[in-house]
Amino acid sequence: MTTFPSITRIVTGHTDDGRSILTEVGPLPSVVEITAIPGTIFHEVWSTTASPAPVGNGADPTLGPLVLPPPPGGTRIRFVDIPPDTEEFLKTGAERMEEAFEQVGDKAASTVKENSPHPLMHRTESIDYGVVIEGEMTLVLDDGEVLLKPGSVVIQRGTNHAWANRSGRLCRMLFVLVAGTYEPGLADKLAGQ
């Protein structure tokens, strides 16, 4: 299977007297393949824990367990390599979703049901910006879907969705996730699903 180049992360910081410096230039320290969905690789770039975000020389927030949503009040940026859907995955994938979402630290995100349009249906209480970097992806919603090509940008507003790779080749997407809160009326509707 095709692979994409590794990602280089450049992190800046400050000296004791306030001068700007490079604190890190190199590969990402947290790159995780999701074993329940072989070939799906999360490349964790950075995250913040508050808004406004503390600006300083703090510790690397990507070290530790993989977590799908952003921290409450925070953000998360990552690349995800998504392999093509296979017939076997489409038939049996729903059975592995609890394990897959547990591995990404958010078992509750999975919304897959027997009649779901794709075995990776899920939802997070966040605003997610998804950008196709290489390859093609199909965004699947409860009602409707759209083909995404390089440069396509999805603004995911806490909706139930899946990423279906029907292209036959690997796709790389960049995601920026921003913690959110469902509006009261919407939260009530979603709780009833």
Image (cartoon, rainbow, N blue to C red):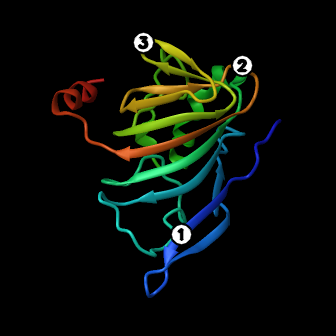
- Outermost residue toward the bottom? 16
Query: Residue at left 61%, top 28%?
Result: 93
Q: Position of residue 168 (x, y in %)?
A: 76, 22
3D distance between C-alphas at marks 1 and 3: 43 Å
Could you say where residue 193 lies in the image, as x and y percent from the top left? 30, 23
Outermost residue on the top side: it is 144
Residue at 25 percent of width and 30 percent of height? 191
Between residue 29 and residue 57, name the one nearer to us. 57
Q: Given contact means CB atoms under 8 Å apart, are the residues at marks 2 and 3 in contact?
A: no
* Numbered-mark total: 3
Q: Residue shown at 72%/39% (left/top)?
A: 39
Q: Amino acid at mark 3?
A: Asp
- Point out which mark residue 143 bears: 3
Left or right: residue 111 versus residue 99 is left
- CA gap between label 2 and label 1 equals 44 Å
Quarter of the image where one finds residue 160: top left
Select label 2 or label 1 by which is in front: 1
Point out the tag, 2 or 3, that comes first from the N-terminus. 2
Check disc 3: other Cα within 10 Å, few if <14, some if 14-19, many if 20+.
few
The residue that mark 2 highlights is: 87
Location of mark 1 (residue): 12
Dot 1 or dot 3: first in sequence order is: 1
Instruction: In this rendered view, identify the residue nearer to me: 184 or 11.
Output: 11
Q: Amino acid at mark 2?
A: Glu
Circle 1 packing at 10 Å, graded few (<14), some (14-19), many (20+), is few
Q: Kindly check if marks 1 and 3 are in contact, taking CB atoms under 8 A apart as contact.
A: no
Instruction: Looking at this view, name the residue that lies furthest to the right.
Output: 1
Q: Secondary structure at mark 2?
A: helix
Q: Say which quadrant the N terminus sits in.
A: top right
Measuring from the top left, give residue 38's x and y in whole percent.
71, 39
Disc 1, SS: strand
SS class, disc 3: loop
